[in-house]
Amino acid sequence: MFVFFLVYGGAVQAQKAEKGKIIRQIEIKGNKRIGTAAIKGSIRLREGDPYNPETVSQDVSSIWAMGYFDNVEVVLEDVVAGLKLTFLVTERPVIMAIIFEGNDEIGSGKLEDQLEFGQRDYLKHYLVKLGEERIKELYLKEGFRFAKVGSKLKRFDGEVEVTYEIKEGPKVTIEKVSFEGNKSISSKKLRKQVKTRRKRFPGFLFKGIFSREKFDEDKERLKEYYVDKGWLDVRVEGRLTYSKDREDVFVAFLVDEGERYSVNKIEIKGNKLFSTPELLAEMMFYVGGPFQPPILEGDARNVRMLYGQQGFVNARVIPKRIFSPVAAKVDVVYEINEGERLYIEDIKIRGNEKTQDHVIRRGLTFFPGGRFDSVKIRESHERLIATGFFEKQSPMPVNVLSEQGSRPGLANVIIDVKEGRTGMLRFGGGFGVNSGFFGDISYTDKNFDALDLPKNMHDFLSGDAFRGAGHVFNVKLSPGFTRTEAIVSLSNPSIYDSVYSAGASAFFYTRKWDEFDEERRGGRFTLGRMLSPNLSVSVTPGFEDIQVRDVDDDAALVIKEERGARKKLSVDFRTVWDTRNNPMFPTKGHLVDADLEVAGLDVEIVKFIASAKQYYKIWDPEWWGAHVLSFNATLGMVESTSDERVPIFERFFAGGAGSIRGFQYRGVSPVDKATREQVGGDSLVLFSLEDTFPLYKNYLKGVAFVDAGKADVNAGDIGLDNMRVAVGPGVRFTLPFFGRMTVGVDFGFPIIKESDDDTKFININIGGAP
């Protein structure tokens, strides 16, 4: 008697067989390339085992899972004293070639990258079908909306040829995007909300390819925009119209606005600490105004913040809306549960194995005994993260928690930190039109402690030594072909956790100018004070030994007369007012820096330099990115306090990056009458207007600028006469794998210049070159 099992795709359908009989023999048939031992190795049953249909089913699945077979059948045969078990397999053919037909616009290599199989792989039908879908998706992504993709198989002896038949059709680009039915909001404003955009210059960035996914998202985005503005019943549909040749598509968004809802009444319940008029003053909603859901949540958040500042951190503010059944009006109700006021009993710091407690505490704006002010706690949290003392890779380097105090109404604040390495060793280099090629070897530690000596070599090498006091230590060597600098500095930003700071530095500097070489060495000591979180003042006495040597024979007489060594004793008085939201890439705020230097000994001068830079985010569309407009103004004046003129190395020059682009570095200044060489001036005036905008994410940005300025003869020459002006575009490349190194290229076109000026069309800076 024979009993057959037919298996396909791992599913077993069996006739009845006597369970428990002994399997006397197991055979594999139908396999040509796959070895019998490999197949038998994948199954559990062995000769001598009792027959079990569940185990047979599992073995079929195991053979199927090997991926080499299109079909697996099982045959049971009665033999003497048991059963003979035979697995009949049908091997999948091997793919001998993959062919693409009809692909004129997209190369075969790019199409083959979409497949999850290759030559010499075993044929899997589902992967062939998946390849059709992937290729179709690629064509849609490239703008071929009418592309069709099919496949066919040509079988040989154990092999198969896979051919994809493609009908590309025309490449479709968006010719126009329009809006219909938008009576209350202009098409210009709506266009800023959508990502579906027509093709425009430059074409390699703004290709105008239609995406159904973006189109559907844009409809929802427009709907959300209307709802947020108060049109709660808005409907947005879409319409696509193609040209006769189907190469252009005209996209239309159809808007049915409906009525705009308004605020009928505002009611506040449960408020005891603040009066209703006081709370209404913190809200943007007003009776008769439009009902905008984001404002509803924003007003509730503002009220919670107001309570949080007073220590009611558990206050609940629940906004509710009640719609009128007869009109587009909404009653707004805020239900407040104030809870109890909390005071800070103690501040506990955890996780700071190296950083001293007082270094962390000086970054806090709240103290024991004070109200549990949620706003100050959030500000302190941000300040601690900004110190850079803690693990930058951690999603929560600083965590602020709270716990119940010793009695009701008191709470402890817990500052939980995860310390990271604060020292950074950098090897790099760069190029600047102002300084040429240079190297950079530097070490900076913002949490330095000179008294934390290493206990052993591992302590030193692991970075566990010299850490924890919050001091800033920096050592830098920057050798170059035309400019070399070395500096060592140590500063304490908060002496005894006060508003006072102190620092000292020693430096060496050489510079090869066209007509002479300049060398400076010396030291400075700085004492500063923070007047507010954004305003600081400092006084810096310093001493320098300055040498002018290797003066060219044909240099101007005023330069030759400067040959030799001078000693300079100076005091700088500096004020810095910084409200920028980000020191590296600011989008708002300003930076004002004013410095007055009084010097004596061999260099008797009074020098004043003030600069101000303001940043504005003028446009921030989601589909493009933030456009930041910056305005910069610099004023400099220097006068000699003796009978001698101001030395050449203390005079002002204009031109180059950071000054007037379109001109050589130091290419704008008064000139020597005999040699026509730039010899510097006693006054400096600079203006710059610059728009920075993204071209590709945060890695590539474009720049458009207008620079103007001059260096003039006398300290009082700060008017607008003798001004030079240049305009032009530029690009900024940010290289994150080089420590966020920035490469800047500017193209300057002087439109107002003098005959003795030195111009330069291209300004290049790599790695923040000075």
Image (tube, rainbow, N blue to C red):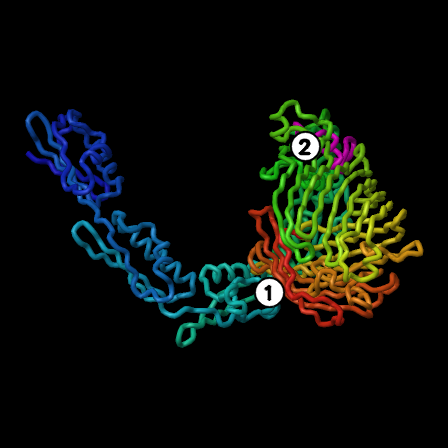
Task: Name the residue that disc number 2 marks.
Answer: 415
Q: Is residue 138 left or right of residue 300?
A: left
Q: Residue at x 80, y 42 (%)?
A: 522
The residues tagged by marks 2 and 1 sit, at their Cα atoms, a distance apart of 50 Å
Q: Position of residue 18 (x, y in %)?
A: 13, 29
Crowd tier of the residue under label 1, counting other residues whose Cα lies within 10 Å: few below 14, some 14–19, many 20 or above: some
Res 494 → quadrant: top right
Task: Name the residue that disc number 1 marks.
Answer: 259
Say if residue 243 shows up in the picture: yes
Q: Residue at x 70, y 39 (%)?
A: 475
Q: Main secondary structure of the magenta part?
A: loop
> Secondary structure beneath disc 2?
strand
Q: Residue at x 48, y 69 (%)?
A: 174
Residue most extreme to the front: 553
**Residue 300 part of the magenta-drawn span:** no
Q: Position of residue 323 (x, y in %)?
A: 61, 56
Labels 2 and 1 touching (C-beta < 8 A): no
Q: Is residue 698 left or right of residue 30?
A: right
Position of residue 681 relative to residue 456, above or below, is: below
- Where does the magenta region start and end? 352-372
